[in-house]
Image (cartoon, rainbow, N blue to C red):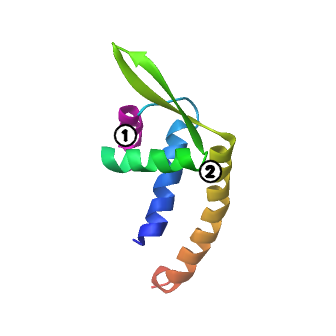
Amino acid sequence: MDIQLKRGLLDVCVLAAIKNEDSYGYRIIKDMHPYIEMSESTLYTILKRLETAQMLTVRSAEHNGRLRKYYRITEAGKQRIEEFRQEWEEILAIWRFVTREEQHE
């Protein structure tokens, strides 16, 4: 898969994982696991990129005597998910075109 396409898809997956409630790294990975596997290093790279793009915010809170970072989606992040939903229709149309001969065999 094209690395830029995959990168964009993973960004949207992470945003979707936190769209309903604040979350932290381990839980994000756990929530995504039934659908996609992601390493911690990949996740934290994505989280940093999304923070820089102002699609999420980060706060630290103590949990069991340690600081844990919690991530919250912003309006820009919610907008990115909506844009993805619209883009997905175009991606599906392209997929249908590419596989049209296979569907009629």
- Is 52 magenta? The answer is no
**Disc with the residue nearer the chain's start (2 vs 1):** 1
Tag 2: residue type? Ile
In the picture provided, is 94 more to the left or to the right than 14? right
In the picture provided, is 84 more to the left or to the right than 11? right
Residue found at the very far top of the displayed protein: 65
Residue 57 vertical position relative to residue 77 in the rendered view, above or below: above
Residue 76 drawn at (x, y percent): 67, 46
Q: Which mark is residue 29?
A: 1
Tag 1: residue type? Ile
| Quadrant location of the C terminus in the rendered image | bottom left
Label 2, label 1: how far apart the Cα atoms are: 18 Å
Residue 14 vertical position relative to residue 83 in the rendered view, above or below: above
> Residue drawn at (67%, 57%), measured in percent from left and top?
83
Residue 14 drawn at (x, y percent): 48, 45
The stretch of residues the image draws in magenta is 25-39
> Residue drawn at (64%, 64%), measured in percent from left and top?
87
Q: Is residue 39 visible?
A: no
> Residue drawn at (49%, 58%), measured in percent from left and top?
9
Q: Which mark is residue 14?
A: none
Residue 10 vertical position relative to residue 15 in the rendered view, above or below: below
Q: Which residue is mark 2?
A: 81
